[in-house]
Image: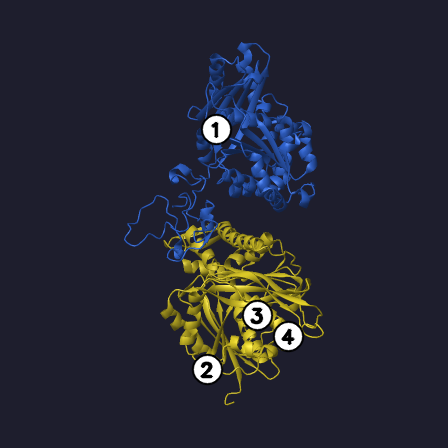
Chain colours: A yellow, B blue
Amino acid sequence: MFNSRRIISAIEIGTSKFCVLVGEVDDSGRLDVIGRGEAPSASSVVKGEIVNMDRAYEQLSKALEEADRASERALAMSRMVMVLVTGCGISSQPGVGMVLIRNADHVVTEAERGEANDNARILNLPADRQIINTCNSFFLIDGRRVSNPLRHNGSKLEAHIHIVHGVSARVGNFRNLVRDSGFENADIDVVFSPVAADYGVLSERERDEGVLLVDLGAGCTEYVMEYDNGMCASGVLQVGMEHVANDLSIALGLSIDQCRKLLVSGDLTRAGESGQSQIRLRGVSGAERVIPLSSFDTVIDCRLREIFTIIRRQLELAGSPCSMAAGGVMTGGGALLPRARELFGEVFDLSCQVAHPRDAEGAITDLASPRYSAVWGALKLAADYFYNNGEAGPGRGLVASLEHNANAFWSGLGKIRKAIKF
Amino acid sequence: MSFTGDISIMAVGGAGCRIMRILRTLPGAESVRLLAVDTDRAALESSGLPEENCLLAGEVWRGGRGCGGSELDGQRAVAHERPRLEDLLRGTGFLLVLCGLGGGTASGGMSVVSSVAAKLKLPNLFLVTLPFMLEGPRRRNLAEKVLAESLFDVADAVVTLPNDLLFSTLPGDVPLAAAFEMADRECAGTALALSAVLGAGNLLNADMASLTALLKRRKSMCSIGVGIVRGCPAEEVPEKLVSGMLASPLLGGPQVLKAADAAVISLLGGGDLSLGDVRNTLDLVAKYLPSDAEQLTAASSHPDWQGARQLCVLTIKYSEAAPDIRTRGAGVRTRPEPLPAPSKPASSPRAGEQLEFTLDPVSKGIMERTTPVIWENEDLDEPTFKRRNIVIDDGRRGKGKRR
């Protein structure tokens, strides 16, 4: 083939920033980040969804150009683009698919597993909704729960999967924007942002023991819950750090940019640690004021506590099992706020650690901030699929490649333990 | 109707149960429904209430062993009992909650109790004691926090009694047990007296609205004096009542009366309570109050108090530092109005519709022109602190926060 480099990219169209990562997969399946581009979203995205297509296009072009330059013009060779989506009326539900094991020795093979998974994806969704991702939760063989059914003996296999679906038109916006930005010939796949973050930051052990991952972003807060290597709940609340900044600006009469900076810069934390009880600031009215730090704390606490409480409530409504031995993991820009981690611990009654992108390697090494968790996860996801599914030719969507190479795909599961479909 | 079948007094937590133990034995208590909620089985049993009036919170989880001063555990335990709490309070016309803040069950449970009361639309009054200074700043801060976050905005009226007043009047050699007993007795008497204040249909009565109006105006500290007189010649009754009231350990002495901004005076007696008794007593009390203090007076009679009188004076001293809520527009510390239905948010009028100037607009800042996020009938784009009616100090001193 004329182009033999395995280049893939991941794009985040976020409320605070647009981020593009370009990666290359080598022959052994190792992923190197070879370029990164970033641009502010300039209010073209609100609460995780695009509100101004033209401006979003401009900003995305800037980010793409930067990534292209950084990767020495490799971006255009991307054969697969993974786009993060959030908001979009996304909700999730469980699905069950059943298959009888008819082969001579009644052993589950990839074929049966694939079929059970496909059956589970059959879902009566309203016409305006589409499935975004599906992830395995667990399997039952003759009613016995297993996390991996391969080579088990039995007569009936049930696949329980977690299905994430959203409003097609709203998801389509993300897809269109990316296609129009110069990816007419690449496979564009969307992935629900926390699913990608999960893939990018969690370890096998954490997923196995049970973990709650909360991605506190600028526009939205997303969560996934994993137990026994299967996803049991996920969702998005379109409230994020922008709301915190907005609350501060209304409560204290400061400008919104001032509040955003205060939250990002860590000035508040430093002032608190150095024993100050007040902070001197110039408000919108121009007059300098002395604002007690406790006022900031109260406003921030109120909002974050509410966010976490709602998520907790949503998890309860989803009836999720609450054994999370690995505790809680926070990621996203909000995780940099120490108070957020404390409140997380208080509300969920879990330990809380901040997750950074795992195994981020390559020329671009400053991916360590939790702000890049989701986009890094998306890149990794794209890389693993791409590697495991052989050379998916241009024009063949990932779904098609999955269907045609079902066996190749499932056999690649040693690498991709998580069966995430698009 | 005397004061009355449908008033409930509910004790929450250990201190509440201790007060309840005394309250149960006072005359007039049987006409009020007495309830108790705690996480500690022993404390609950010591209150001596019949089992159907007791609620052991978080029994499965805490095992009836209390929650060891942890307000999170308290909150969780009481929150578990929300449905049972609602059942317990169903049919109640007025709720008076007794508790001591600073511990676990009461501090944590207050938010639940107050929200249940709000949900059932029960008129309510919270009589809470604040911990002694010597118990350490943690408890004190916790109590202040609970007051600010869970009570002031949700409850109709809150009467806060600092335990420290006990020390200001009692001599140092009084045994500790006796001091506590005395404080509990005062609280119990106060609870009954307040329910009497609100029991309608008597000689003079003060209704809930007027009491709420007094207590809601500003952050305040209250003190209470109760004087009880039994079987003594009628002409001596007023003096004895007033001197008993002045000696009350939770009043803090006559100087507190002298400094009060407002006072609620209630006189409770049997069928033999005469107009002259009331007038004489009230006149006498009034001498101790500053002339410009607002007074709310009430007199009630109940057959159980035949031949006995109880005078209860609740003084209210508004805090100097807190701004007067009256000057800042109405409705700051009242219960939040239900939010507009999600389908028709106030901030997005249809095209062509004239914008209505409302007195209390809730600014959504940069979220003004975005699709609202609605969760359980609340518009999450509005700042949380506003929906919770929390007043934030923005450093513009003296002016308060302009709305």
Q: Disc 2 or 4, which lies upstream in sequence?
A: 2
Which of the two marks, 1 or 4, is nearer to us in this view? Answer: 4
Q: Disc 2 or 3, which lies upstream in sequence?
A: 2
Question: In the image shown, does A363 or B341 lie closer to the viewer?
Answer: B341
Q: Position of residue B198 (x, y in %)?
A: 49, 26
Contact between marks 1 and 3 (CB within 8 A): the answer is no
Q: Amino acid at mark 1?
A: Ala
Residue A118 - label:
3
Contact between marks 1 and 4 (CB within 8 A): the answer is no
Q: Within 10 Å of the Cα at label 3, are there few (<14), some (14-19), or many (20+) other Cα atoms?
A: some
Q: Report, in whole angstroms, how far the alpha carbon at label 2 lies from the one at label 4.
A: 35 Å
Q: Amino acid at mark 3?
A: Asp
Question: In the image shown, does A289 or B371 lie closer to the viewer?
Answer: B371
Q: Report, in whole angstroms, how far the alpha carbon at label 4 lies from the one at label 3.
A: 12 Å
Residue bearing mark 1? B260
Name the chain letter of the residue that bears numbered label 3. Answer: A
Question: In the image shown, does A394 or B295 lie closer to the viewer?
Answer: A394
Q: Say yes or no: labels 2 and 4 on the same chain.
A: yes
Name the chain letter of the residue that bears numbered label 4. Answer: A
Residue bearing mark 2? A76
Name the chain letter of the residue that bears numbered label 2. Answer: A
Q: Within 10 Å of the Cα at label 4, are there few (<14), some (14-19), or many (20+) other Cα atoms?
A: some
In this rendering, does residue A369 appear at all?
no
Q: Report, in whole angstroms, how far the alpha carbon at label 1 lies from the one at label 4.
A: 82 Å
Q: Position of residue A392 (x, y in %)?
A: 53, 81
- Please, is residue A1 above or below residue B85 in the view? below
Q: Position of residue A227 (x, y in %)?
A: 64, 62
On the image, which quarter does residue A388 sit in?
A: bottom right
Residue bearing mark 4? A110
